[in-house]
Image (spheres, rainbow, N blue to C red):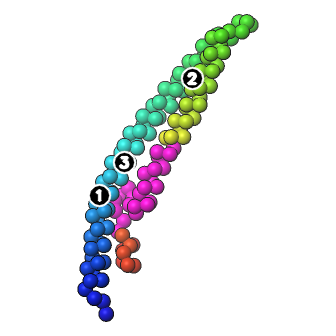
Amino acid sequence: MTNGSERSGTSARTTAEAVLLDVVVPRLAALEASQNAMNGALGLMLDTLQAQTNLLRKLNEYATEDATPSPVAKFLSELISAIEDLDASIGSMEEKFAKLTDIIAEVYGTDSAGIKPPNVNGSGT
């Protein structure tokens, strides 16, 4: 025999979960849009860094044409190395941002299509 307080507790819990999902899903969508924008910006940064690296390599080639050691060539080599390190770091950030939305959606039981019904007391999918 089920008493009324158990049913009202389940109903309140279901309502609270629905309200939580109503709050979480739009925020996840906004987060996903923000991350897509950040990934686009990071992609542009990577493209720019690659172009700069190519130009610096050309300058380095010209600076090392002479047989004498050049402080310019040494500095350009160090600068190219620093940019390559930055490029790798930005690439890593881009990958992490791309995974974040999926992880949050998995934790809160949502997907890009919207809400997955909560599994409350064996009901739902």
Question: Considering only vertical position in the picture, is 49 above or below 21?
Answer: above
Circle 2/circle 3 CB separation < 8 Å: no
Looking at marks 2 and 3 on the same chain, the residue that comes earlier in the sequence is marked by: 3
The image quadrant of residue 53 is top right
Is 102 inside the magenta-drawn segment? yes
Nearer to the camera, 67 or 86: 86
- Amino acid identity at mark 2: Thr
Q: Which residue lies furthest to the right in this view?
A: 67
Residue 87 vertical placement versus 116 (above, below): above
Q: What element carries label 3?
A: helix
Q: Observer-nearest residue: 6 or 110?
A: 6
Residue 21 visible in the displayed image = yes
Residue numbers of the magenta segment: 95-117
Q: Name the residue under label 1.
A: 23
**Local crowd size for mark 2, using a 10 Å CA cut-off: few (<14), some (14–19), many (≥20):** many
For mark 2, what is the residue?
53
Q: Is 9 left or right of 46, judged from the image as shown?
A: left
Q: Residue 31 carries which label?
A: 3
